[in-house]
Structures are given as C-alpha cells and as structure tokens.
C-alpha cells in the first residue's frame, strides 16, 4: 500500500544577531531561489560544517 511520508524534522527556535549586510545577502539568495530565509541559513550552516577542516569536525 502506498503511503505518503512526511518529514518529521524537529526544530528549535534560536535567536541570532547577524550583521545587516549578511542578512541582506542571505535574503537576496533566498528570494532568488524561492526559499525561506531559514532554509538558506540551514543549508549554509550544514555546508560549512560538512566542509570544515578535519581537525575542527569534532563538534558534530
């Protein structure tokens, strides 16, 4: 039987203070790709963590 699966990603709210110019760059990228600001930030953080130097990957 076919069943639709829903992503059950648990989220938690965190407040961040970001420089205005960084917010503008991320928002522009989000707008250009029809994504939310939050989704772009999540993808940027995931990419940064996945591409850290090996000696810094211990935080995962």
Image (cartoon, rainbow, N blue to C red):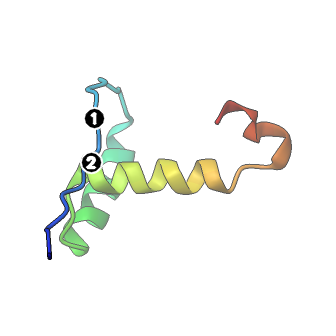
Image quarter hosting the C terminus: top right
Q: Are marks 1 and 2 in contact (CB under 8 Å)?
A: no
Q: Which residue lies at the image location 78% right of the left edge and 38% below the top edge?
A: 56
Q: Farthest front residue? A: 1
- Locate residue 17 relative to residue 48 in the image: left or right: left
User: In x, y percent, where is residue 37?
Assistant: 24, 52
- Locate residue 56 relative to residue 37 in the image: left or right: right
Mark on residue 11?
A: 1
For label 2, the SS is: helix
Image quarter hosting the N terminus: bottom left
- Locate residue 25 relative to residue 5 in the image: left or right: right
- Locate residue 41 relative to residue 52 in the image: left or right: left
Badge 2 is on which residue?
A: 38
Name the one closer to the observer, 26 or 2.
Answer: 2
Crowd around label 1: few <14 · some 14–19 · many ≥20 (10 Å): few
Q: Earlier in the sequence, mark 1 or mark 2?
A: 1
In the depicted structure, whether residue 28 falls above or below residue 60: below
Crowd around label 2: few <14 · some 14–19 · many ≥20 (10 Å): few
Q: Could you say which quadrant of the image residue 4 lies in? A: bottom left
Q: Could you say which quadrant of the image residue 55 lies in? A: top right
In the depicted structure, whether residue 20 falls above or below residue 6: above
User: In x, y percent, where is residue 14?
Assistant: 31, 24
């Amino acid at each position: 039987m076919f069943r639709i699966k829903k992503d059950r990603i648990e989220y938690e709210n965190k407040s961040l203070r970001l420089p205005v110019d960084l917010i503008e760059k991320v928002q522009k990228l989000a707008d250009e790709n029809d994504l939310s600001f939050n989704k772009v930030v999540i993808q940027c953080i995931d990419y940064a963590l996945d591409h850290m130097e090996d000696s810094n990957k211990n935080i995962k």
